[in-house]
Image (spheres, rainbow, N blue to C red):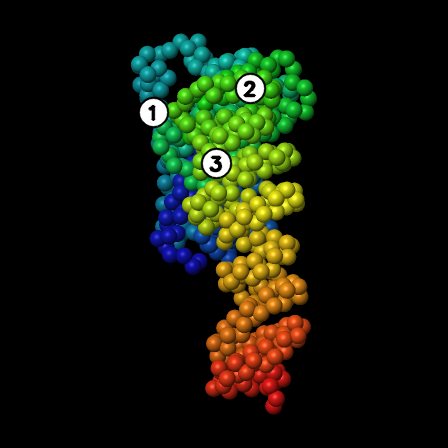
């Protein structure tokens, strides 16, 4: 394992905490995983352990050999080829191999066992019991304890109160104590909420929509109150919640919704209004949930017009969200003239918010609305891409290019496509390279290659053959540069490469009936490098000059 001990120790700390939190020493399942993993470790049955960045791969020789992939950042997302669900003995054995490099496995096991014995939430005396359930030292009535947990009820207001009672049973501090597990924690929380779903099949999707909407708002508010900054990976928990909301809406749309759903839909609409009046939640999450519900669920034209009237009359502290919400309503109604004014007010922040709109409008074949957005994004893209790190910029540009309906855009405005791809260089290189070849814009293609400084060998697979065939005179500067660079390396193989490129140049001159220019070029090269005998010899072998 080519990794320093201190680096490994730093990486294993969160993984150790995660495993100790996942496996309960008081449960047989947890005991079995640890004991069997320890046995495999002590029998030296773990092999080929390799650590690369945040990933560990290994093989374990059990009854059947298995392959392991440990995720150091998100341990509970680790994989094993065995049929077990969750953390298994093979992953445990591999963890012990890693931990053995930085500490004593026996001490880890003692620490794991001791954590449960002093479980922080367990009362240790009658006084503790009274404090836990009464807070005042006095026993409470059984009816009071039963009322602590609300029933789900049959109205949207009762559902919301029920969710609040469920949330009080969750340890929300884990989101701050174990931020590297935030995605897993939110998924588990959602599963616990879904266990309380109505038995009736037609009500389950509505409950799922309510529950995930509630969790999105409450979790986001909690993180904002605690000033928790999320990494790119941690934002995936919002993708999960939005995915669950989308799944619920798809199920609801299969059949016509019964009239009994109307108060619930109206309640959700009111909640989005309340959300837009508050500046407590993060703008991005608010905008995602708001736009999602108004796009998929609140489709009545009169509702959308009423919402526009409300937003136009509103002076909101959270100006960004206000502009996003108003622009969303204009786009939904395809009132592009009014949308134009809001886009100017939103400024450069249009780009990060555009992902939702581009995805929805282009996939929904509402091309004119998508085209409106793309035109406004053009001037804002360079600054946005420049502000991202390399990985994020590459991801964004690939996604952006992939979401665009290129055939339609090329017919609509090919010049706009050219400007878009040009504005996102170097991250859009391969897309722009392909665009230029397809458009037969060979002069621009040559300029692009000079900008990117690729070798001739690399250019061969990116269009150099097409340029040499269709516009050979434009390929000459590329081969000139290739010859000089090859000769300057001053070794036999590079001289052979230079001769090969010179033959390409000769072919181009013959094709363009400019053989006199070839003679002048050859004389210049031979004179310039007359002291390089090996190069001169390769020119004779290549029959560029007489023997």
Residue that label 3 marks = 350
Image quarter where the C terminus lies is bottom right
Kindly state the secondary structure of the residue where label 2 is placed. Answer: helix
Query: 52 above or below 127?
Result: below
Query: Does residue 197 sit above or below 438 in this rendering?
Result: above
Position of 29 with respect to 547 (left or right) is left
C-alpha span from label 1 to label 2:
60 Å
Q: Residue at x 63, y 84 (%)?
A: 543
Disc number placed over residue 124 in the picture, else none: 1
Q: Nearer the viewer, mark 1 or mark 2?
A: 2
Q: Is the residue under label 2 in contact with that under label 3 (CB below 8 Å)?
A: no
Q: Is there a contact, CB below 8 Å, between mark 1 and mark 2?
A: no
Q: Position of residue 267 (x, y in %)?
A: 53, 16
State how far apart marks 3 and 1 are (Cα).
56 Å
Q: Which residue is mark 2?
A: 305
Q: Nearer the viewer, residue 21 or 510?
A: 510
Residue 107 location in percent, x, y?
36, 45
């Amino acid at each position: 394992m080519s990794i320093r001990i201190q680096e490994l120790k730093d990486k294993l700390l969160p993984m150790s905490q995660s495993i100790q939190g996942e496996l309960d020493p008081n449960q047989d399942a947890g005991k079995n995983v640890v004991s069997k993993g320890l046995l495999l470790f002590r029998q030296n049955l773990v092999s080929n352990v390799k650590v690369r960045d945040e990933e560990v791969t290994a093989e374990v020789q059990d009854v059947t050999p298995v392959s392991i992939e440990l995720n150091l950042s998100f341990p509970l997302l680790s994989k094993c080829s065995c049929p077990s669900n969750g953390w298994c003995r093979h992953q445990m054995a591999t963890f012990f191999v890693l931990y053995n490099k930085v500490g004593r496995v026996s001490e880890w096991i003692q620490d794991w066992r001791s954590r449960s014995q002093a479980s922080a939430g367990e009362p240790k005396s009658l006084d503790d019991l009274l404090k836990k359930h009464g807070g005042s030292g006095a026993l409470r009535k059984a009816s009071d304890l039963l009322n602590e947990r609300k029933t789900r009820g049959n109205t949207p207001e009762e559902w919301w109160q029920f969710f609040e009672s469920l949330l009080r049973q969750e340890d929300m501090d884990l989101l701050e104590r174990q931020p590297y597990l935030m995605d897993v924690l939110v998924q588990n929380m959602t599963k616990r909420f879904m266990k309380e779903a109505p038995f009736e099949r037609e009500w389950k999707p509505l409950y799922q929509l309510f529950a995930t909407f509630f969790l999105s708002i409450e979790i986001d508010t909690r993180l904002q109150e605690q000033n928790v900054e999320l990494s790119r990976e941690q934002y995936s928990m919002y993708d999960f919640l939005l995915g669950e909301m989308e799944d619920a809406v798809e199920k609801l749309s299969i059949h016509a919704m019964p009239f009994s759903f109307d108060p619930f839909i109206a309640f959700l609409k009111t909640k989005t209004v309340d959300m837009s009046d508050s500046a407590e939640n993060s703008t991005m999450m608010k905008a995602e949930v708001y736009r999602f519900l108004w796009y998929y669920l609140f489709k009545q034209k009169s509702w959308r017009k009423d919402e526009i009237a409300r937003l136009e009359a509103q002076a909101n502290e959270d100006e960004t969200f206000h502009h996003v919400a108003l622009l969303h309503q204009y786009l939904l109604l395809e009132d592009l003239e009014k949308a134009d004014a809001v886009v100017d007010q939103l400024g450069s922040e249009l780009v990060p918010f555009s992902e939702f709109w581009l995805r929805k409008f282009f996939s929904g074949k509402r091309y004119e609305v998508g085209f409106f957005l793309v035109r406004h994004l053009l001037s804002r893209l360079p600054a946005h891409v420049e502000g991202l790190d390399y990985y994020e910029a590459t991801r964004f540009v690939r996604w952006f290019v992939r979401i665009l309906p290129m055939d339609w855009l090329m017919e609509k405005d090919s010049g706009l496509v050219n400007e878009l791809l040009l504005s996102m260089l170097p991250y859009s290189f391969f897309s722009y390279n392909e665009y230029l070849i397809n458009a037969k814009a060979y002069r621009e293609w040559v300029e692009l290659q000079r900008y990117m400084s690729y070798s001739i060998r690399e250019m061969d697979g990116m269009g150099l053959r097409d340029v040499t065939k269709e516009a050979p005179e434009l390929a000459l500067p590329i081969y000139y540069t290739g010859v000089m660079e090859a000769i300057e390396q001053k070794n036999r193989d590079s001289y052979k490469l230079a001769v090969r490129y010179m033959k390409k140049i000769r072919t181009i001159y013959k094709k363009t009936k400019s053989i006199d220019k070839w003679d002048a070029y050859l004389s210049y090269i031979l004179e310039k490098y007359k002291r390089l005998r090996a190069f001169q010899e390769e020119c004779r072998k290549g029959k560029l000059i007489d023997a």
